[in-house]
Amino acid sequence: MLPTYKGNVLHPEMGCLECKVNVLRDFSDILRENNNFQGFLFRGHQFESYKLEPTILRSYKGERVSVEKYQKYVEEHYVNFISSLRGRFNEQYDAGREKNEMWALGQHYGLSTPMLDWTASPWLALYFAFREKRYLRIDAADANDETYNKSDRFSENRSVYFLNANNIIQGYYFQIKHYFLECHDKNSISYPVKSVGEYDAFFLESVKTDLDDSVQKILNVNDGYGEDVVGISEYTKKCCEYAVRKVDNYFPRIVSPKRGFNNRLLSQRGLFTYSPTPDSLEKELMTIWMNMKHEQNYLLLKLLIPDDLRDEILETLYEMNINDLSLFPDIHGACSYANWKSSRKNYR
């Protein structure tokens, strides 16, 4: 179902909906009217013009590169990160199998990564959209304390993105299942010996019957662990690897780290998206949406919110215990929260 706003159905354009809310009450109403967007992830931006670009992609700004070149650069960057981490991280990890976990760790400490931070709470995303104050952009020669500290009420809105994670996950699973079955049937990998035994037949039948569990079996075989690996032929294993590699080359993924490396993730209900191409996530999603059969399978909603609501929004979220003290369980969060508490008198 397409979402509604004040009783009107929102229709997607290239898989993305865009809607402006004028008062904070509208934000609350659109959540309530649409069952709080269950199955979605959320992300706040200080400026509506900011794209959904991972930090590693921004280093390519102005330079169009191929998917192959981009992925090679990402892999080299990861190897450099793991190498630099030696002697500085005490927990045991598998750099090959736990790439997403290590990317998430690096993201926390400022590493450029192919991942974007999201939260499972729309209210936390709203906080991150309005957390930072905007300042006037002035030349150094004209700088003085009074001018620098004057809040700049840009005409540009802030924004909160709603990502249809359920549709993306289902699309990712569907594509892997499709390529696995095609490979197994047509020998897309040109494997010299197509050996299919009793275990393979059971595995193949289970893949055909259920989407979520079957794809997890394929992913387990690709990762090389779990009971699904036992007894199946090298041919079936190669088809699993082929399917995952094929889809991972173009389809963005939802990443939920399982290791407890980052306490902030728990406080912020954090998850990530992983972008495999040198395009913004908007463009990746647009390509996916164009291949979907029904226009109601929208993938992204963007709410535009006026900047002049900042004071009201922060005060409201403060009453909901959404602030730096609750979201950053460390010394940095305590300092940032104390600074904000002291500054409240400046705008209340």
Image (cartoon, rainbow, N blue to C red):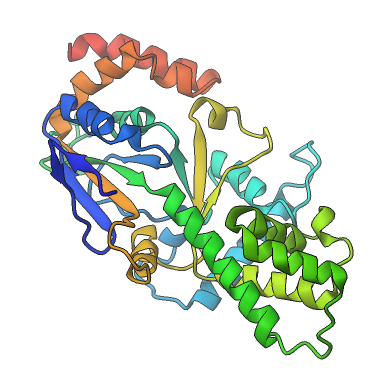
Q: Position of 102 compared to 153: left or right?
A: right
Q: Position of 18 compared to 44: left or right?
A: left
Residue 296: give x, y in percent of width and height: 29, 57
Residue 326: give x, y in percent of width and height: 47, 18
Going 66% across and 39% down the picture, which residue do you hit?
258
Q: In the figure, 36 relative to 325: above or below? A: below
If the image is split into quadrants, where does the C terminus sit?
top left
Q: Position of 48 compared to 201: left or right?
A: left
Going 71% across and 51% down the picture, which residue do you hit?
98
Residue 199, picture quadrant: bottom right
Q: Closer to the camera, 8 or 272?
A: 8
Going 76% across and 65% down the picture, which residue do you hit?
203
- Answer yes or no: is residue 137 visible: no
Residue 127: give x, y in percent of width and height: 33, 28
Q: In the figure, 289 relative to 335: above or below? A: below
Residue that lies at the very extreme toward the right in this rendered image: 231
Q: Closer to the camera, 9 or 169?
A: 9
- Answer yes or no: is residue 60 visible: yes
Q: Closer to the camera, 293 or 72?
A: 293
Q: Closer to the camera, 42 or 34?
A: 34
Residue 268: give x, y in percent of width and height: 48, 29
Residue 29, picture quadrant: top left
